[in-house]
Each structure stands twice: as C-alpha cells, then as structure tokens.
Image: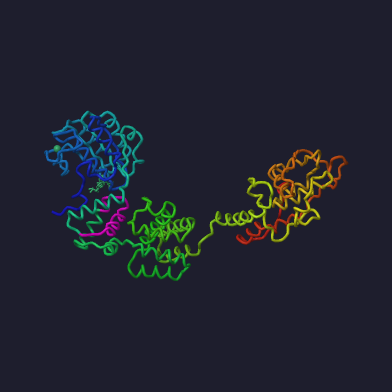
Amino acid sequence: MYQVIARKYRPQSFDDVLNQDHIKTTLRNAIEQNRIAHGYIFSGQRGTGKTTTARIVALCLNCEKGPTDKPCGVCPSCVEIAAGGAVDVIEIDAASNRGINEMRELRENVRYQPARDRYKIFIVDEAHQITNEAFNALLKTIEEPPEWAVFILCTTESHKIPATIASRCQHFSFRSVDFNDLIDRMREICTSEGVETDDETLAVLAQAGEGSVRDSLSALDQAIACCGNKLNADQVRGLLGAFGLDAMAQVTAALSANDGAAMLGLVDELERNGGSPQHFSRELSRYIRNLLVTKIAGEDSRLVTASPAEKKELARIAGMFAEEDLTRYLQFSLELFRDLQFSMQPRFHLEIGLLKMIQAGKLVGIEEALASVGGETRQAAAPPARVAAAPAQATPAYSAPSPAPRAPVSPGPNKPAAPQQIFAGPPSPDDDWREKLQSGMIKAGLQFSADAMGHAEAALVNNELIIRAPKQFQLDLGREEIVAALKQMGHPTLRFKVVFGDVKPPGGEGGQTPKSAPKPVAQDEVTERALNHPEVQKFRDLFGGEVRNVRNLKE
Ligand SMILES: Nc1ncnc2c1ncn2[C@@H]1O[C@H](COP(=O)(O)OP(=O)(O)OP(=O)(O)O)[C@@H](O)[C@H]1O
Ligand SMILES: [Mg+2]
Ligand SMILES: [Zn+2]
C-alpha cells in the first residue's frame, strides 16, 4: 500500500529529526542519566516534529536494549512502536477525546503496570483541546503518577494548557524548521524516491510549508502525483497556486511607476486565470514582507525564505523603495488581506486595495527631509568657519551660519559687510560693545543670540568684556556663542565674563553701562528675519503651508 512521504520518512531517531537541537540534547541527556520526567509538554507550530519526537522518546524508553538514546529499531518493542501498534504506548487524540469521561478512563489505565515494556507512555495529541474539567481530573495523576507512567502532551497552542498542568511538566517548544535544512531533506527524499528536481522547485515546495515539514512533504507528494518523476518549478507553482517572484514583481513595478492601469490589468489577469484574490493578497503580503526584511536585514538574511537567486532579485526590488514605503505597503496589504476574508466582492476589494497603495505614493521620509534642510546649512557653514582666525572650535549645531541670501536685518547701522575691517584695531572701552557683539553674532549666524544681546549690556573694563544679561537668555548667550561672535569681530582672544541677573532698564546711569540703550527688536522685524531664514524657506518648500505667527521663544 502506498504510504505518504511524510509518514514514510518519519524520523525514527533523534539524529533524523531536523533542527530542534535544544530539545534533542536535553532529552538525550535525560535518557542517558535516567532522569525521565513524568510529564512533558511539546508545543510549537504544526508539522515540526512534536508527535515524531514523542514517539522517539517512547522508542528510547521502551527499546529492549534501553533505556537508550539510540533505540535498536529491530526489537519487538521498537518495531511495534514505530508501526504505532504498541500496547504500552497509548496515543490519544484529544481533539476527539477531550471530555471528563475519557480522562477518567485514562486515569484508570495509568494505574495498571505496563503489559510488557518498561514504561507506559501516553502521547496526548492536540492536548489544548482537553476541557478544563477533564484537565482537573488528570491533575492528580500527572502530579504523582506511578513510576512507569510518562505523559507527553503535544499541542500547537501551549497557552491553552492550564497553568496547574503546565507547572507539573517540562516544557519544550519546537521551532519551525530551517528553510535550507528542509530543502536538503527534501532533496534526499527525492533522490531516494527517484524524483528529479532542482533547487528552485524545492524552494517553492519548502515555502509552501511555511516552516512545517509535514506541509512541505505533503506538497512534494502532491507534486509527484501530478508531475511524475520530473518536477519543475513553474508546474509546481501552478499546482500549489503559488505566485512566482515575477508575478509579484509586477505589483511593485506598477507601484514604482504609479501605474494604476497596470495594476488593474494584473487583477484582471488573475481573475481570468482563476486565481483567488484572497490567496493573491496573502502572497502579496508575504512578498512585501520579504522585501522589507531584505531592506532592513540585507540580502543574505536568514529571515527571508527564498533561493539565492530570488534573494538577489528581492534585494534589487527592495532597493527601489524606502523602508517607510515598504512598511506602509505591508500595512496596506495586510489590511487588504483582512478585508478580503469577509468580502462579497473580492475582485473590487483587491482592485481598490492595490490602487490605494499607488495613491499612497512614495513619501519622502521625514528624517530625509529634515536631513536635507540641516545638510544644506551645515555645508554652508564651512566657508565662514574658515574666516575665523582662531583654530576651529566645536560650534553648536544650530549656530551654523546661514548663507542668508537676503541680508539679515541688522539691529545696528552696520551692514555686516567686511566686518574684519570695521572691528580691526585694539579693543577700546569707548566702542559700543553690545552692538559689536550683535553684529558678530549675526555674522556667525546666531540670530537668537543677537536678539538676546539686544536685551543685554556689554562694556569693556580693564581689557575684560563684561556682559550682563537677563537670566532667560542664558541659553542664547553661552560661552560658545560669545566666542563665536568675538572671532567674527576680530577679537578671538578677548577675555570676557557673562553675568546673568537683573539688567538695568534701557538708558541706565553712566559709569560702565553701554552708551546706547538696548533696543528691543520689533515684532515685524523678527517675523521678517524668520521668514527670510534659509532653513525656514526650505521647510516651506518641502511642507508648504503658511507661517501665521512667529514667536520669539525667549520672550
Ligand atoms: N523536525 C523534523 N524533522 C524531520 N521531519 C519532520 C520534522 N518535523 C516533522 N517532520 C515530518 O513531518 C511529519 C509530521 O510530523 P509530526 O507529526 O511530528 O508533527 P507535529 O509537530 O506533531 O505536528 P502537528 O502539530 O500537526 O501534530 C513527520 O512524519 C515527518 O515526516
Ligand atoms: Mg502531532
Ligand atoms: Zn529496540
């Protein structure tokens, strides 16, 4: 009688089980050291080896030569267990035996010694289906079972196993099987079945299983049944309803070309070929997800299950989009997939969904936009920095001088042209230091500092510049700003001191106070300056909109 490949090639020893190394090692050690627990939970994705491993544990424990981690495979116990007919290995399908009566029966059964073998092993498949009362009936048995009893609860949904049961068991989670290992295994199977294939076909079959070995092997069975002893990728794709990268790449091509008509053409073709919109959107999500992962993790990422040639192509396509674009497309495609599950008009839904992706368009990432604004001014910062005489010092990022295409409004009569000459010569106490500092700051692109200077006093006393400013300008009149201004003024080494506190109202008494009173900067002047600022202009170019209100944060 014909036996399906998945069963025919069911591993009979730990060595044959793909991956799951953490589980194999622990179980092997436990068997070797004779530290067998009475309760195990094997959880994980379907078709990853839970039932298989449970049977291998049974073989190991009950083999005549055992307990051993290498069962002989030929003794009556081994043969019977492998064939699934051993009296002392009881497999219970909890999907159909989930009630309290079945569990009471089981409890009775546990009490009797094994008929022939060392252990009585209960393999409970789909254990999460057992009802709560039934679990409670089992609790005592699992906690204090007779020495010969071993329970192995297999489940795809371990969170549904009550904590009371779980805490009495050792828990192993089975991982989905590595793509390349699975391909290797299928290649071996094909060889021993006398089936000719190639890597691309095997990749299609491996993808079809989505990490489940059983599903991939079933697909292989189906492919052999359909195509005979020679498998080719296109045929197998057609059989499994899988979409090749080419088909999917048409979607991204339409996206990148903003071509709605092409998108609609795709849907039409899908329908004419009898394809299912649901299936298509699912494959589309997977495809976009692969693009996104490739974009983030690189072409060689193990997170993408695809053949090397496909990975290369994915990387090429991913290069046409930004990470943010792909993230949004993935979001859209998942929403589309969800909507299609309930849709009465799947075709229309698919059309709308794909068109929405186009309409969403490609966005310029906000970081990119901001970087371009900052980048320009940062570049512009270079030449003025060279003007400064003193060796370059770290300047705060925002102090980068802007090239100011339209001359910035200067608070004083001095146009900032040729400042070196104006400020040349030894420092003199008679100069208007506040004004000089303001001009220097404007020259250095420190608009806010220049504004702040408007509220400050400055005087040269014993060759030291004393600056007094209200407390709220502490940030704008830091040492770095003043050093930058002094450099612009041609006094890079002048000693100075900044005192924050009360500043006398404009027009204060003589002595060391500056000659002219601080001039508050008029609001429309501030507005004009803000609007003329190149970064502001760049922002307006990028984001549009209007500037309604300009506020000096320091006031
Ligand atoms: N890790 C693996 N290594 C090799 N073959 C495997 C592995 N996992 C599954 N298989 C193959 O898949 C078939 C089904 O495996 P098994 O019954 O152990 O899966 P399962 O995890 O119990 O799945 P389910 O949750 O659906 O019960 C096996 O007969 C075997 O051929
Ligand atoms: Mg199973
Ligand atoms: Zn044996």
Residue 43 position, x and y percent, is: 31, 42
Q: Is residue 168 left or right of residue 66?
A: right
Against 46, is 204 above or below? Answer: below
Residue 37 position, x and y percent, is: 26, 31
Against 153, is 316 above or below? Answer: below
x 70%, y 44%: residue? 483
Residue 233 position, x and y percent, is: 28, 62
Image quadrant of ligand 3 equals top left
State which region is magenta: 196-216
Residue 208 position, x and y percent, is: 30, 56
Which residue is at the front of the view, 492 or 378? 492
Report which quarter residue 506 is drawn in.
Answer: top right
Report which quarter residue 71 is drawn in.
Answer: top left
Which residue is at the front of the view, 223 or 141? 223
Which residue is at the front of the view, 205 or 500? 500
Q: Is residue 157 left or right of residue 431?
A: left
Which residue is at the front of the view, 247 or 169? 247
What color scheme is it? rainbow
- Does residue 214 show up magenta in the picture? yes
Q: Is residue 534 visible?
A: yes
Report which quarter residue 285 is drawn in.
Answer: bottom left
Q: Is residue 395 visible?
A: no
Q: Main secondary structure of the magenta part?
A: helix
- Does residue 212 show up magenta in the picture? yes
In the picture, the quarter occupied by the N terminus is bottom left
Q: Is residue 527 left or right of residue 360?
A: right
Against 231, is 120 above or below? Answer: above
Total count of labels: 0
